[in-house]
Image (cartoon, rainbow, N blue to C red):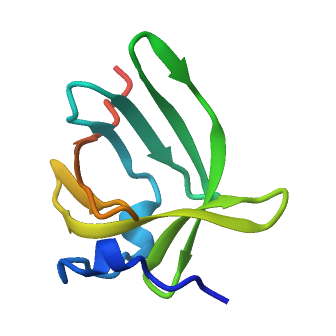
């Protein structure tokens, strides 16, 4: 059973459903100057996250699940859903999401460089 969307995130009425082709292979880096976050979503349902601020950085490997257009972090060991990323917009260059607490977050979309 899916958790209900948070009141904080849905109050803005600006989120749209995710599609699998938008998530698989997506890599982004936060545009927040005070907190670094890099996320890379694999086709196998895993997301590598590097995040930190003030010189402290963590690099967990988590899962992701797309359920009825909703994107969740996922704990594959305990089969539990984590935080949700509410999609506001996605272009070739910019991802805008709303976190479950309602805050708007912007990420630069990074593209792999071809091997030379």
Q: From what the image shows, is residue 114 above or below residue 9?
A: above
**Could you say which quadrant of the image residue 100 lies in?**
bottom left
Q: How many marks?
A: 0
Residue at the image point whose x is 44% and y is 41% from the top: 39
Q: Quadrant of the N terminus?
A: bottom right
Residue at the image point whose x is 28% and y is 37% from the top: 30
Q: Quadrant of the C terminus?
A: top left
Q: From what the image shows, is residue 59 above or below residue 88?
A: above
In the image shown, does 14 or 102 lie closer to the viewer? 102
Residue at the image point whose x is 23% and y is 54% from the top: 95
Q: From what the image shows, is residue 47 above or below residue 114?
A: below
| Image position, residue 76 (x, y; %) | 77, 59
Q: Residue furthest right?
A: 77
Judge left or right: residue 36 versus residue 88: right
| Image position, residue 55 (x, y; %) | 43, 10
In the image shown, does 115 or 39 lie closer to the viewer? 39
Residue at the image point whose x is 22% and y is 34% from the top: 32
**Could you say which quadrant of the image residue 14 lies in?**
bottom left
Judge left or right: residue 40 versus residue 92: right
Judge left or right: residue 34 versus residue 75: left
Q: Residue furthest top?
A: 55
């Amino acid at each position: 059973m899916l958790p209900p969307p948070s009141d904080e995130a849905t109050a803005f009425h600006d989120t749209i459903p995710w599609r699998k082709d938008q998530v698989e292979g997506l890599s982004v880096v936060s545009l927040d100057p005070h907190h670094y976050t890099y996320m890379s979503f694999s086709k196998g349902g895993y997301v590598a996250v590097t995040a930190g601020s003030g010189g402290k950085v963590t690099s967990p490997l988590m899962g992701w699940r797309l359920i009825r257009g909703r994107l969740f972090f996922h704990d594959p060991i305990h089969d539990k859903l984590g935080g949700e990323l509410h999609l506001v917009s996605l272009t070739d260059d910019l991802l805008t999401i709303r976190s479950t607490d309602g805050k708007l977050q912007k990420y630069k979309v990074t593209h792999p460089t071809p091997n030379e």
